[in-house]
């Protein structure tokens, strides 16, 4: 039996794709009892594939669509198309394939750093110190039975909600939330690794924000079916994914079984590092859940 990896080592191994041919890479999924591949994993692996074909510049934006559920029992092939290699900007398109069909599509743009104008929205002042907040297991304890074995799985990303966690349905409905997050272990200094790890983590908790106005917990599949549909990120300033980052989220709208959420990711020192927008499926399950979503059930 092999030596068990810690969660961060396992995540880095998952992001370390196998080159198969020019512009073609293969990725695997962790050995977990999942019905589908975690969307952040596919996005992170696709960005790794794109970055492996870029010689200069760092990713400044990505736009992705989740097309089909990923099968966690078989490898994922990533085909990279070299759209443009310019002096300042480089563009790549990545298609993730399983069972002969595309399950995910990503476009990413890379930019060589250059001086320019600077401004940013200020970091909220009421987020407190993440070290003073309960850890993920403590905050999500009310959902232990709902999550089953997934609750006890070692996690490569530490999430800590400011105020109420998704497991706490008390108090008034809210259209925003704040989450501190970081990798649970030290990462190499390569900025590409930090970008890909944060891309992986950015799919965590964001769609949950669209459920908060309706009093649902995204972890309870008996109440609501959720799935990421598309995901966009813009990278503004340097950061480390193994240091605390504040994920400030809000949800401007939900309709037609879809919810949209926006996120701003700040370093602990207050630099706005990344902007995120995601739309996802939020489909109530069962008559009671549908009535509650429509306002017919309030408790």
Image (tube, rainbow, N blue to C red):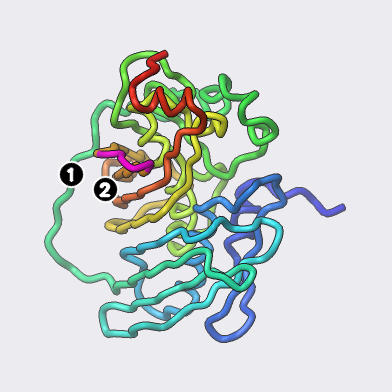
Q: Tell me if I can see residue 76 in this picture.
A: yes
Residue 272 shows which numbered tag? Answer: 2
Give the dominant element type of the magenta stretch: helix, strand or loop: strand
The answer to whether the residue labelled 2 contacts the one labelled 1, judged by CB atoms less than 8 Å apart, is yes
Give the image location of residue 155, x and y in percent: 60, 41
**Left or right: where does residue 182 sit relative to residue 110?**
right
Helix, strand, or loop for circle 2? Answer: strand
- Residue sitting at x 46%, y 33%: 284
Residue 80 shows which numbered tag? Answer: none
The number of numbered badges drawn on the structure is: 2
Q: What stretch is highlighted in magenta?
A: 253-257
- Residue sitting at x 14%, y 52%: 119
State which quadrant residue 263 falls in.
top left
Up the image or down, 120 lies above or below 17; here it is above
Q: Residue furthest front?
A: 287
**Left or right: where does residue 272 sit relative to residue 53?**
left
Looking at the rendered image, the quarter that the C terminus falls into is: top left
Up the image or down, 194 lies above or below 163; here it is below
Q: Tell me if I can see residue 266 in this picture.
A: no
Crowd around label 1: few <14 · some 14–19 · many ≥20 (10 Å):
few
Q: Earlier in the sequence, mark 2 or mark 1?
A: 1
- Residue sitting at x 48%, y 78%: 80
């Amino acid at each position: 039996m092999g030596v068990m990896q810690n969660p961060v080592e396992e995540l880095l191994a998952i992001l370390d794709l196998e080159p198969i041919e020019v512009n073609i890479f293969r990725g695997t999924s962790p050995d977990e009892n999942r019905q589908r591949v975690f969307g952040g994993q596919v996005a992170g692996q696709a960005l790794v594939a794109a970055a492996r074909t870029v010689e200069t510049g760092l990713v400044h934006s990505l736009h992705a669509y989740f097309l089909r559920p990923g099968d966690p029992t078989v490898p994922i092939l990533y085909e990279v198309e070299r759209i443009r290699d310019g002096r300042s900007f480089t563009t790549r398109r990545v298609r993730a394939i399983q069972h002969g069909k595309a399950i995910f599509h990503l476009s990413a743009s890379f930019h060589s750093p250059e001086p320019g104008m600077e401004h940013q929205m200020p970091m909220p002042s009421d987020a407190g110190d993440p070290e003073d907040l309960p850890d993920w297991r403590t905050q999500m304890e009310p959902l232990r039975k709902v999550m089953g074995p997934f609750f006890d799985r070692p996690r490569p990303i530490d999430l800590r909600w400011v105020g109420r966690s998704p497991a706490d349905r008390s108090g008034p409905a809210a259209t925003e939330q704040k989450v501190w997050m970081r990798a649970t272990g030290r990462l190499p200094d390569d900025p590409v690794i930090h970008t890909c790890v944060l891309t992986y983590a950015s799919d965590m908790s964001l769609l949950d924000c669209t459920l908060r106005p309706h009093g649902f917990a995204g972890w309870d599949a008996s109440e609501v079916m959720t799935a990421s549909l598309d995901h966009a990120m813009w990278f503004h300033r340097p950061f480390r994914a193994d240091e605390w980052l504040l994920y400030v989220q809000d949800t401007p709208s939900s309709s037609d079984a879809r919810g949209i959420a926006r996120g701003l990711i700040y370093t602990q020192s207050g630099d706005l590092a990344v902007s995120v927008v995601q739309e996802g499926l939020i489909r109530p399950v069962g008559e009671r859940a549908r009535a509650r979503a429509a306002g017919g059930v309030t408790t």
